[in-house]
Amino acid sequence: MSWLKKLFSGDESVIDIDHVAIVVSDMDRGVEFYEGVLGLKLIRDGRSQGGEKKTFLGTESGVLVALTEDKTRKHAEDRNTGGVNHIAFGVDDLEKMSGLLADKGVDFIEEKTGEDGTVTAYHFRDPDGIELEICARTGGDVPTY
């Protein structure tokens, strides 16, 4: 882990995650899910550019996901997504957001709880089978699950 110590020695040059690049099998369906279900805002719509389309979605604070379309990508519930275990989105009101997602037909595949038994995160899948999470903001703390 010496590479990690070198990376963060002195002034920190890496401060947070800027965005996650996700390959989707259908760009329109991906945008519909991330915009319509998760409530992200369309920041740059690359669909009209053809070819390897890049579409960026996020919040007022900036880009969270960059979608690229690969029509040959096959969807499967338990497919290995190339080393990505899941992508976690921090939310201000976990119960409100989980209710909104459930109302939009999202099926949760796992709930995480803290030591006090309170739900701290919900896991679910996007239309291409990528596991996503909404979680209560942890600040600088590491989740207890």
Image: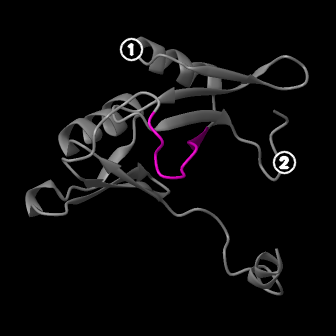
Farthest residue in the right direction? Answer: 115
The quarter of the displayed image where residue 2 is located: bottom right
Determine whether, in the image, residue 89 is placed left or right of residue 37: right
145 shown above or below 49:
above
- Residue 88: in magenta span: yes
Who's the residue at 65% across and 34% down the image?
135
Q: Which mark is residue 105?
A: 1
Q: Main secondary structure of the magenta part?
A: loop
Q: Callout 2: few (<14), some (14-19), or many (20+) C-alpha neighbours within 10 Å?
A: few
Q: Which residues are magenta?
A: 79-90
Who's the residue at 80% across and 19% down the image?
118
Q: Which residue is mark 2?
A: 141
142 shown above or below 36:
below
The quarter of the displayed image where residue 143 is located: top right
Who's the residue at 21% across and 55% down the image?
45
- Residue 111: in magenta span: no
| Figure quadrant of the C terminus | top right
Q: Position of residue 136 (x, y in %)?
A: 69, 34
Q: Callout 1: few (<14), some (14-19), or many (20+) C-alpha neighbours within 10 Å?
A: few
- Looking at the rendered structure, the secondary structure element under dot 1 is loop
- Looking at the rendered structure, the secondary structure element under dot 2 is loop
Q: Position of residue 15 (x, y in %)?
A: 67, 70
* Tags 2 and 1 touching, CB below 8 Å: no
N-terminal of the pair, mark 2 or mark 1, is 1
